[in-house]
Amino acid sequence: MRKRFGLFICSTCGRARVVDKETKSSSCPYCGNAEKTDKMVFIYECNDQETAREALGQAAGFEGVDPKAEKAKKRKIENADPYSTMIYKYEHTSDLDEKMVILAKGLTKVKGTFTLEDVQEIVGERNAEKYVAAMMDRCYIAEVRPGQYKSS
């Protein structure tokens, strides 16, 4: 069977890429340099594009995904402390609305109902009242009892 795909190193920018050998020419997606396929020297050849992509990944230093490691990682995430997970998500989100959703759902999941003081522990004293007001305005939370809030 004829090998249809190959790994090629661009002569202009030096980056590796997958090329379909059935085409007459191929342009580098990185630098735009076009070269005739029949003049290319391939460093690896195979019958299908998926195998060529895997070879490119290995050549670039990416290792295959270990299913056991993925399962262990998933278990670790499932067993993670919900409060710490909420804090991590909050701190690693840049969108203000998303931060409020994370707080509303996370505090409700952890505490059932939460107070202004609970929000202060996360966002600081200065911004807590603004967060609670904004979460109520956007209907992310509702005041179920005076001073007690819950995700809606």
Image (tube, grey):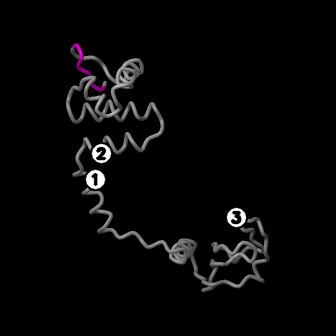
Mark 1 → mark 3, Cα distance in angstroms = 37 Å
Mark 2 and mark 1 in contact? Answer it, CB < 8 Å. yes
Query: In this view of the protein, which residue sits in the foreground, 87 or 8?
Result: 87
- What's the residue type where badge 3 is placed? Pro
* Dot 1 amino acid type: Ile
Magenta stretch contains residue 64: no
Left or right? Give the position of 25 relative to 78: right
- Disc 1 packing (10 Å; few <14; some 14–19; many ≥20): few
Instruction: Tell me: 134 left or right of 107.
Output: right
Which mark is first along the chain, 3 or 2?
Answer: 3
Asked if disc 1 and disc 3 are in contact, CB closer than 8 Å, the reply is no
The secondary structure type at the circle numbered 1 is helix
Task: Determine whether the residue tagged by mark 2 lies in a helix, strand or loop.
Answer: helix
The residue located at (48%, 36%) in the rendering is 95
Mark found first going from the N terminus, 1 or 3:
3
Few, some or many residues within 10 Å of mark 3 (<14, 14–19, 20+): few
Picture coordinates of residue 1, whole percent (x, y): 60, 86
Residues 53 and 46: in front is 53
SS label for mark 3: loop
Kindly identify the residue that appears in the image at 22 percent across and 13 percent down: 146
- First in residue order: circle 2 vs circle 1: 1
Taking 29 as reference, is 112 above or below it?
above
Amino acid type of disc 2?
Thr
Q: Which residues are magenta?
A: 146-151
Which residue has dot 1 on it? Answer: 77
Q: Which residue is mark 3?
A: 29
Residue 56 or residue 4, whichever sits in front: 56
- Whether residue 147 appears in magenta in the rendering, the answer is yes
Is the magenta region chiefly helix, strand or loop?
strand
